[in-house]
Amino acid sequence: MHSVRKVTEDLYWVGANDHRLALFENIHPISRGVSYNAYLLLDEKKVLFDTVDWSACRQLLENIEYLLEGNQLDYLVINHMEPDHGACIEEILVRYPDVKVISTEKAFMLMRQFGFEIEGHELIEVAEGDTFSFGGHTVTFVAAPMVHWPEAMVTYDTTNGVLFSADAFGSFGALDGKLFNDEVDFKGDYWLNDARRYYTNIVGKYGAHTSALLKKASTVDIKIVCPLHGPVWRNDLAWFIDKYVHWATYEPEEKGVMIAYATMYGNTESAAQALAAKLCERGVTNVVVYDVSNTHVSTLISETFRLSHVVLASVTYNLGIYPIMHNYLMDMKALNLQNRTFAIVENGSWACKSGDLMQKFIDEELKNMTVLNERLSLASALLPDKESELDALADSIRDSINGVE
Ligand code: FEO
């Protein structure tokens, strides 16, 4: 059965939702599912923008067949050929052998690399600034390298201001019938958090490239944004762009403290909670506390992009940083995270090493980070004789948050 939504007078969402996939890219949990968005333009020419994951191919085909009403599909525009969007290219070519495929040189190269049977079909290679008319609609193609793969482009419909934005402005979370940003509570707990977790973990490393795309986007009048995942944006776009500006430039969205702790028997956890209470007593109430062992690293990364201050509280393990905490730090490095202020809590029963090692990692492996001088150093547990050190650490974080040198 088809399941489509109208975006504009002659543009339809023809994608699909997936609640069965547990891990996006086989790594990031998606408890609310994900949507694979594709769009069909019914102009003089019939144009499909991108496809969907292989698991949703049948739904895409039913949606297209329903809307085409027996007409031929004329063009397939591939903005991004990663398999969650490009997996059905071959099947579209089998069903509609006369369709002409429009994409970038690199995308065609990748299609061949993945073994797609594209030879014998008309392949139209486009580059930055090329335009194409489908009848009433004229589009221009804009290169978007590394947002999120090197072959990516976005397509701007100059006729009505629709931007097919590929992975940009996407989000985890299945649409479940809703389509537009104003049909969901995007600013509530779920959508914004999932959009941030999606961007920061999937595209976060490529902030400079995202900034370059945002700069290009600022030169045209965008009315509607059609991403490849999550809601279509038809209003309040400036609010979402502002989030992207923060993420792409690695600037925190909020002044606040994330306490990430690694504990074995609960003693480092107890210190993390005591510090959270001390901060709140000092008026710093935008505080979140995460156990790195039971919080997926994609959430830790997302929250680190959101907040200005991070407390790393880690037990020493095999004379090193607790492995899961170390993995979190490695992810920060991999995603190019910058411009945060850190405080350190270390613990070790006989050879406390984790503090120095975390400091060394921050200083040598990460960019543009600050580590506060005050450190809480524990030998097994937080005992009353350490309260003055805890107070000094809380004071230091408060002063840093408040901009007091
Ligand atoms: Fe949703 Fe980069 O693919």
Image (cartoon, rainbow, N blue to C red):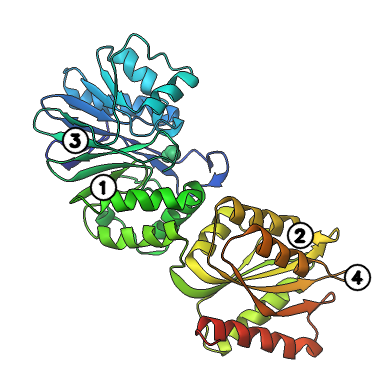
Q: In which quarter of the image is ligand 1?
A: top left
Q: Tell me the amino acid under the disc marked 2.
A: Tyr
Marks 2 and 3, the one that precedes in the sequence: 3
Quadrant hosting residue 72: top left
Mark 1 — residue?
225
- Camera-side residue: 68 or 163? 163
User: At 37% across and 25% down in the image, what residue appears?
Assistant: 105
How far is disc 4 from disc 3 in space, using C-alphas? 66 Å
Residue at the limit of the structure toward the right, as seen here: 350
| Mark 4 neighbour density, 10 Å: few (under 14) some (14–19) many (20 or more) | few
Percent x, y of residue 263:
75, 66
- The reply to whether discs 1 and 2 touch (Cβ–Cβ < 8 Å) is no
Mark 2 — residue?
322
| Mark 2 neighbour density, 10 Å: few (under 14) some (14–19) many (20 or more) | many
How far is disc 2 from disc 4 in space, using C-alphas? 15 Å
How far is disc 1 from disc 2 in space, using C-alphas? 42 Å
User: At 67% across and 81% down in the image, what residue appears?
Assistant: 274
User: At 35% across and 36% down in the image, what residue appears?
Assistant: 16
- Camera-side residue: 118 or 41? 118
Residue at the limit of the structure toward the left, as seen here: 136
Element type where label 4 sits in the image: loop
Q: Judge: label 2 CB < 8 Å from ligand 1.
A: no
Marks 2 and 4, the one that precedes in the sequence: 2
Marks 4 and 3, the one that precedes in the sequence: 3
Mark 4 — residue?
350
Mark 3 — residue?
139
Element type where label 1 sits in the image: strand
Marks 1 and 4, the one that precedes in the sequence: 1
